[in-house]
Image: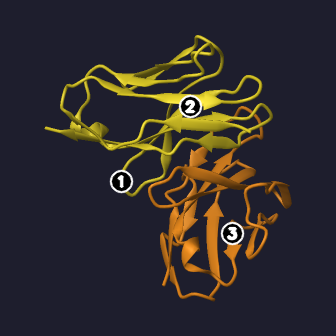
């Protein structure tokens, strides 16, 4: 079955630091890849996605590239802000529909 | 356009009681998904429903858990005879279609079993 592994948190950074959150996956076929963000007390929001190899998803300064050869989808941001503090989840879907398999989540804390 | 609405936001039950969690999908969405998030873990898929039908319940525990999505009204996740291990955040998501559609998540129901 599908599985997603992402780096454990918490990740603590100073404002304007560079962010990388690693994510690797195992899947059959050609899944789509997603990053979701969960702010305190809220549900998950889609941050970005990529649907095929070498696609780059980007949103709000975050980006991630679908790397089929390394089965990875690492999340990056060049300069984080305090408002980026949240839990970030990497996810993949199956080929047939919308059921998502999530990683364990990575808590990001950005200090001013 | 209201998003996915879940209620209650917090639910406290004693062991052996029943818990009923409600989810109203976004307007125009007929596909509903339930996920469970245990403390310090990621979300685990439980069940996928389309109006009046269970499409995939491969993530649902075989005992005590059931879900429905009637023709009228919200989707209901029902947990009978709750135990402490059921304490978790339960999230509902909805989509317009069943394939390659964006999922919209509710804010979740935090179930605490005393």
Name the residue that disc number 3 marks.
B77
Q: CA distance from mark 2 to mark 1?
A: 20 Å
Rendered location of residue B89, percent (x, y): 52, 63
Q: CA distance from mark 3 to mark 1?
A: 23 Å
Name the residue that disc number 2 marks.
A34
Can you say whether B90 is above or below A47 in the image?
Answer: below
Horizontally, residue B23 falls left or right of residue B106, namely right
Chain identifier of the residue bearing label 2 in the image: A
Q: Are marks 3 and 2 on the same chain?
A: no
Chain identifier of the residue bearing label 3 in the image: B
Counting residues from the start of the chain, the first of labels 2 and 1 encountered is 2
Picture quadrant of residue A108? top left
Rendered location of residue A9, percent (x, y): 36, 43
Q: Are marks 2 and 1 on the same chain?
A: yes
Can you say whether B4 is above or below A28 in the image?
Answer: below
How packed mark 3 is, by other alpha carbons closer than 10 Å (few <14, some 14-19, many 20 or more), is some
């Amino acid at each position: 079955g599908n599985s997603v592994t992402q780096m454990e948190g918490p990740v603590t950074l100073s404002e304007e630091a560079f962010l990388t959150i690693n994510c690797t996956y195992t899947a059959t076929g050609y899944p789509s890849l997603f990053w979701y963000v969960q702010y305190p007390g809220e549900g998950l929001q889609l941050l970005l996605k990529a649907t095929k190899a070498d696609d780059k998803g980007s949103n709000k300064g975050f980006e991630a590239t679908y790397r089929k050869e390394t089965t990875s989808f690492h999340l990056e941001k060049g300069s984080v802000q305090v408002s980026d503090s949240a839990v970030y989840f990497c996810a993949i879907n199956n080929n047939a529909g919308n059921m998502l398999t999530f990683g364990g989540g990575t808590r990001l804390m950005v200090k001013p | 356009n209201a998003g996915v609405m879940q209620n209650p936001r917090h639910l406290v039950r004693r062991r052996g009681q029943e818990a009923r969690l409600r989810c109203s999908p976004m307007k125009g969405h007929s596909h509903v998904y339930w996920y469970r998030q245990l403390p310090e873990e990621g979300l685990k898929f439980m069940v996928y429903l389309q109006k009046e039908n269970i499409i995939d319940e491969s993530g649902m525990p075989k005992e005590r858990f059931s879900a429905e999505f009637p023709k009228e009204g919200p989707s209901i996740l029902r947990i009978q005879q709750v135990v402490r291990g059921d304490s978790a955040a339960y999230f509902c998501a909805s989509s317009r279609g069943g394939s390659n559609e964006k999922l919209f998540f509710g804010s979740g129901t935090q179930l605490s079993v005393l």
